[in-house]
Image (cartoon, rainbow, N blue to C red):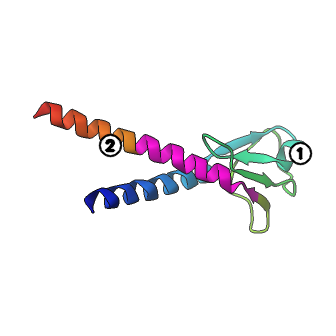
Amino acid sequence: MKSILTHLVILIVAIVSVWLTATFQQVTVQNKEDLRAISCGWPLTFVTSNQEWRDPPYPYTLKCLSGEWGDSAVMQWSSVALNVLVFYVGLAALLQIIRIVRLKKK
């Protein structure tokens, strides 16, 4: 049961991490054309947003998910799932490494 809870917590942390990467990621656009397809997400792009309604001075830096409600953002859910998997595997491996190091210190 403890193992299931640990993996559930890792999964939740992975989901939150993926969301936060897109939320706080910044993109610099050089022209109006760049505003039409702002791609965000790491390591795989999973959000594409059209923010061409903006008329900023160029170059302009904006957060990926900083658009107004109604922006035409498209989520690629398969990429979201793969990103969560990457974060999950990384976090689970890190936790295992920490456990091994602690055991060797004893």
Q: Is residue 21 visible?
A: no
Please, what secondary structure does the residue beneath circle 1 have?
Answer: helix
89 within the magenta span: yes
Q: Residue at x 54, y 50 (%)?
A: 84
Numbered-mark total? 2
Q: Amino acid at mark 2?
A: Leu
In this image, 64 relative to 20: left or right? Answer: right
Q: Nearer the viewer, mark 1 or mark 2?
A: 2
Q: Position of residue 39 (x, y in %)?
A: 74, 46
Q: Residue at x 41, y 44 (%)?
A: 91
Disc assigned to residue 105: none
- Mark 2 burial class by Cα count in 10 Å: few <14, some 14-19, many 20+: some
Q: Position of residue 77 (x, y in %)?
A: 67, 56
User: Above or below — where is 63 with respect to 8?
Assistant: above
Q: Amino acid at mark 1?
A: Lys
Of the two numbered discs 1 and 2 on the same chain, state the one appearing first in sequence.
1
User: Above or below — where is 75 with respect to 31?
Assistant: below
Q: Residue at x 84, y 42 (%)?
A: 34
Q: Which residues are magenta?
A: 74-91
Q: Position of residue 30 (x, y in %)?
A: 83, 37
Name of the residue lying farthest toward the left? 106
- Mark 1 burial class by Cα count in 10 Å: few <14, some 14-19, many 20+: some
Residue beneath disc 2? 95
Residue beneath disc 1? 32
User: Above or below — where is 63 with respect to 72?
Assistant: above
Q: Is residue 12 visible?
A: yes
